[in-house]
Amino acid sequence: MINVRAAQRYALAIFRVTEEQNITDSVSRDFELIQRAIRESYDFFLFLRSPVINTERKKHVFAILFEGKISDLTLRFIILLTTKNREGLLSDIIDQYAVLRDRQRGILNITVQTAVRLTSEQEKDFTNQMGDTTGKNVRMTFTVDPALRGGFTVHYDDTVVDASIQHQLDLLRLKLTEKVS
């Protein structure tokens, strides 16, 4: 929880700077490049979190990897994180930055889990329904979880809507065990 709060503070700080300088999109692209590197290279992920590699070495590696590929502001931000020994939070900071950017643009990220794959028409209908319900532009992610047995779950912000058959069965089991006891 402490790391999430720290990541939120750093993300908010860089987001405010990028808004002031009107370079939010540019830094977003930089962060997407860095996040892709973190996710695609386990060695890079371990490098970020390694307490054995000294700060100066990490700064040098960041300069070699990203100089000329990302904006100076983004590179200076990563160097600042490294100086403060917070480079291990970089992935979380990038995620939090994306949340702030989307919130500013009125975009709500929603994840829907279903027991079976939805057709493109069903996904479109679901997207339209969630947009109408929330009154926001929505970005939907659909995943399949056969453990749901049927129905769906919807996750956004701090909200979970569980309309799965598995949830209904759990509620029924709870009611039946209460009456027997």
Image (cartoon, grey):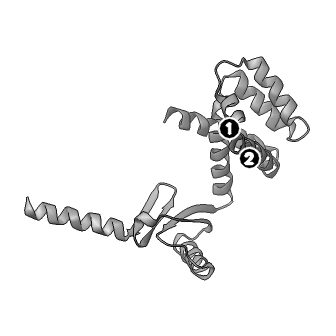
The residue positioned farthest toward the left in the image shown: 181
Query: Can residue 12 be seen in this snapshot?
Result: no
Left/right of residue 35 with respect to residue 64 in the rendered view? left
Left-right relation of 114 to 162: right
Residue under label 1, please give it.
42
Query: Do the numbered discs 1 and 2 sit on residues whose CB atoms are within 8 Å?
Result: no
Q: Nearer the viewer, mark 1 or mark 2?
A: 1
Image coordinates of residue 137 in percent, x first then y, are 64, 68
* Residue name at image x 65 percent, y 24 percent: 50
Name the residue carrying label 2: 36
Give percent across and percent down for residue 63: 85, 29
SS category of the residue bearing label 1: helix
Q: CA distance from mark 1 to mark 2?
A: 11 Å
15 is higher (above) or lower (below) than 55 = below
| In the depicted structure, whether residue 177 falls above or below residue 43 | below
For the residue carrying disc 1, how many other residues have a C-alpha within 10 Å: few (<14), some (14-19), or many (20+)? few
| Earlier residue among tags 1 and 2 | 2
Residue kind at label 1, given as amino acid type: Tyr
Q: Nearer the viewer, residue 47 or 28?
A: 47
Say which of 104 and 43 sits in front: 43
Residue at the farthest bottom position: 121
Q: Position of residue 31 (x, y in %)?
A: 75, 45
Tag 2: Cα neighbours inside 10 Å, few (<14), some, or many (≥20)?
few
In the image, is residue 47 above or below residue 120?
Answer: above
